[in-house]
Amino acid sequence: MARLLVLGGSWFLGRAVVEEALARGWEVTTFRRGQTGHDVAGVTPIRGDRTNPDDLARLAAGGPWDAVVDTSSFVPRETLAVAKALDPVVGRYVLISTVSVYEGWPVEPLTEESRVLDCPSTAGPDFGFDGNPGPSIYGFTKAGCERAVTEVFGHDRAVLLRPGVILGPYEYVGRLPWWLHRVARGGRVLAPGQPHRSIQPVDVRDVATFALHTATADGPVGTFNVTASGRETMSDFLTACQQTTGSNATFTWITDEEWLVAQGVAQWTELPLWRTYRGAWAVDSVKARDAGLITRPLLDTATDTWAWLRNGGDAVAHERASEQGIAPDKEHAILGTWDARERDRCGSQ
């Protein structure tokens, strides 16, 4: 029986990793403070703070484990301390990172060979700077966390997973839940950008499954972008929301994105998943697919997330959730202005 340590384990992705590992019959230990979320039934919980050396020493004493999946790494120097404490008692370190570590995100198409932001493994939480559209302090510090893990575990025992947008049940950012609720409300829905633009959100359960695949002794090591294939589009996404909720909503596609930006609509948040930069949904994940990544259709993700919401699903409270979604009055006003613009254009032809 495989022995797995999960750093985190009660929130979104961590929870999915734990549930999948338990379903496989693995022995699972979680390490977290216990201040939010709930332990999944069947785990062995160890309470502690990753910033506390005594807690890390007590954690290491609970080993050994075949692998650790770290879903709660954000500060490089803290990750370095965790990696050093676990090095003697863990066979493989799987770090959940992000595509934000790339210098070119979200402007340029990306592969695993794309240039990564430079951040030392000893950096604190405020290293780097926030640009517009990028890079970000979040990206810099995640890059530093990657460096910390590889410095300690080496390239033969470290796995760096770089997902983009993750959706699915228990999502706490609220991107898919907002769209599901908006489409369910019906009426005219402001649909942003080109309907046939490919998008690459990945289901949380598919990320978890691939993470566990890399955590096994004979699993692949190295760095992997973890995104959907890009075969589905924004239109597919909104249609999935409509089919899932049984809504009579109609979509008004505002394809003039410069105009939409000029109306003061915040990309990525007021209309979740909409971003004009060409690299936002151009993250190559062929390497991960060749190594075993399988991603499910958006309709499946939407259906299961809606079922979770309808059954009283409640995500862990997170400040980013309040950023998601455009106010109804603002959406209505923009649609009205768009209608007038289109009438003027037709009348002048």
Image (tube, grey):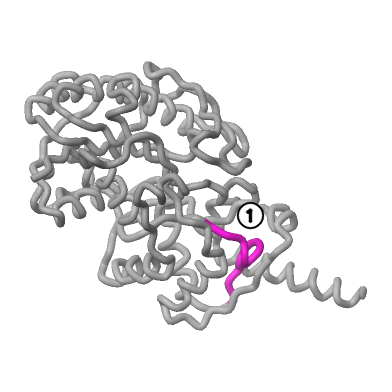
335 sits left or right of 280 in the view: right
The residue drawn where x is 15% and y is 48% is 39
Work out whether residue 272 can be spotted. Answer: no
Residue 49, percent from left and from top: 20, 29
Residue flagged by tag 1: what amino acid is it?
A: Val
* Disc 1 target residue: 265
Residue toward you, 235 or 124 = 235
- The span shown in magenta is 188-199
Q: Is residue 346 above or below residue 212?
A: below
Q: Is residue 103 above or below residue 295?
A: above
Question: The N terminus lies in which quarter of the figure?
Answer: top left
The residue drawn where x is 56% and y is 39% is 105
Residue toward you, 258 or 94 = 94
284 sits left or right of 107 in the view: left
Residue 263, percent from left and from top: 70, 56
Question: The C terminus lies in which quarter of the figure?
Answer: bottom right
The residue drawn where x is 11% and y is 36% is 46
Residue 80, percent from left and from top: 30, 21
The residue drawn where x is 29% and y is 36% is 94
> Dot 1, crowdedness within 10 Å: few (<14), some or many (≥20)?
some
Work out whether residue 328 can be spotted. Answer: yes
Magenta residue check for 190: yes
Helix, strand, or loop for circle 1? loop
